[in-house]
Image (cartoon, helix red, strand yellow):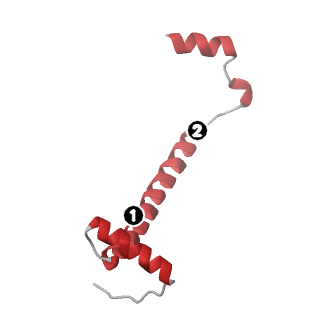
Amino acid sequence: MKNITVSVPDHVYRAARVRAAERGTSVSALVAEFLAGLSEREAEFARLEAQRREVVARIKHFRAGDRLDRDALHERAVR
C-alpha cells in the first residue's frame, strides 16, 4: 500500500473529519474509498461502453421509415 500526501483547504479537512467521525473511520480511509470508487466507476463505464458498441454493431438495418405508426405500436403493446 502506498502513502500519499494531499493538501486541501481547512474547511474541506474539517468537513472530512466530521464525515469520517460519523462513519466511524478515518479521513485516510475515506480518501482511499473514494479513490477505489473512481477506478471501479471507470471500469464499469468501460464495460457499459463495450456493451453499447456490441449492441450498435448488431443493428444491421435501420431506417426512420421503418417505424411503426401510432396505431400499430399501441396494438403491438396490448398483445
Residue linked to disc 2: 59
Note whether 37 is above or below 13 in the view shown: above
Residue 53, image x, y percentages: 54, 50
Is the N terminus in the top left, top right, bottom left or bottom right quadrant? bottom left
- Image point (60%, 13%), residue name: 74
What residue lies at 36% left-to-right and 76% top-to-bottom? Answer: 17
Q: Give me the residue at 44% from left, 86% from top.
A: 6
Please provide percent x and percent y for residue 45: 48, 58
Q: Is 17 positioned to the left or the right of 10 in the image?
A: left
Where is residue 14 shown, x and y percent of the image? 42, 78
Looking at the image, residue 77 lies above or below residue 20: above
Disc 2 marks which amino acid?
A: Ile
State the residue in front, 5 or 72: 5
Q: Which residue is mark 1?
A: 40
Classed neighbour count for the residue bearing mark 1: other residues with Cα under 10 Å, few (<14), some (14–19), many (≥20): few
Within the image, what quadrant is residue 31 found in? bottom left
